[in-house]
Image (cartoon, helix red, strand yellow):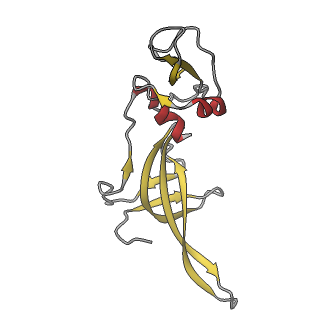
């Protein structure tokens, strides 16, 4: 475990608190996650024990899993984020998470010309075709050939 990583308190499922180190932070469509390392004992092949680092990504829920250690500086923790687009912002508490996408078939020169590709949009995108089909995650990933820059559909899809 890196001594440079700042210390945090991690709450285990049974309510115990152990001291760990905060290794990284990243944003996901489900909200912020923090990577924490905790040094614990691990069994060796000769039936001995040795210290080993265990790492886990935990949700950044207001003190439910983690709390800061007094005096620790978290300014140097590697952070992936914040979201680059409003569509990627965390949903408010209690919001129903329902991701859906739609596709737009691009044409070279008008409705009856040959296809030029597929543009994937987040379903609520303001530039998506109004009559486009609603796609689930698998369908959207299959259709993803070129992603709309207006709604950041590709960035959301690659994070799921």
Q: Could you say which is closer to the camera, residue 57 or residue 94?
A: 57
- Is 144 rendered above or below residue 45? above
- Is 45 rendered above or below residue 85? below
The residue positioned farthest toward the bottom in the image shown: 46
Horizontal and vertical percent for residue 141?
59, 34
Residue beneath the point at 50% across and 34% down: 156
Q: Could you say which is closer to the camera, residue 154 or residue 35?
A: 154
Horizontal and vertical percent for residue 28?
50, 41
Residue beneath the point at 58% across and 84% down: 50
- Is 148 rendered above or below residue 22? above
- Is 37 rendered above or below residue 47? above
Horizontal and vertical percent for residue 32?
47, 43
Instruction: Assign the N terminus to one quadrant of the image.
Output: bottom left
How many marks can you see?
Answer: 0
Residue beneath the point at 39% across and 59% down: 69
Instruction: Determine if residue 65 is in view.
Output: yes
Horizontal and vertical percent for residue 155?
46, 36
Residue beneath the point at 50% across and 27% down: 92
Instruction: Determine if residue 119 is in view.
Output: no
The residue positioned farthest toward the front in the image shown: 114
Instruction: Assign the C terminus to one quadrant of the image.
Output: top right
């Amino acid at each position: 475990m890196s001594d440079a990583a700042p210390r945090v308190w991690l709450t285990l499922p049974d309510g115990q608190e152990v001291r760990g180190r905060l290794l990284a932070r990243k944003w996901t469509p489900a909200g912020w996650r923090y990577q924490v390392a905790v040094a614990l004992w691990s069994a060796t092949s000769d039936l001995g024990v040795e210290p080993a680092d265990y790492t886990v990504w935990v949700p950044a829920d207001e003190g439910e899993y983690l709390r800061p250690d007094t005096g620790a500086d978290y300014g140097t923790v590697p952070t992936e984020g914040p979201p680059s687009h409003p569509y990627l912002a965390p949903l408010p508490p209690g919001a129903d998470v329902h991701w859906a996408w739609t596709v737009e078939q691009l044409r070279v020169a008008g409705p009856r010309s040959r296809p030029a590709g597929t543009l994937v949009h987040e379903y609520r995108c303001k530039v998506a075709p109004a009559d486009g089909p609603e796609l689930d995650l698998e369908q959207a990933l299959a259709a993803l050939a070129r992603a709309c820059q207006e709604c950041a559909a590709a960035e959301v899809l690659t994070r799921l």
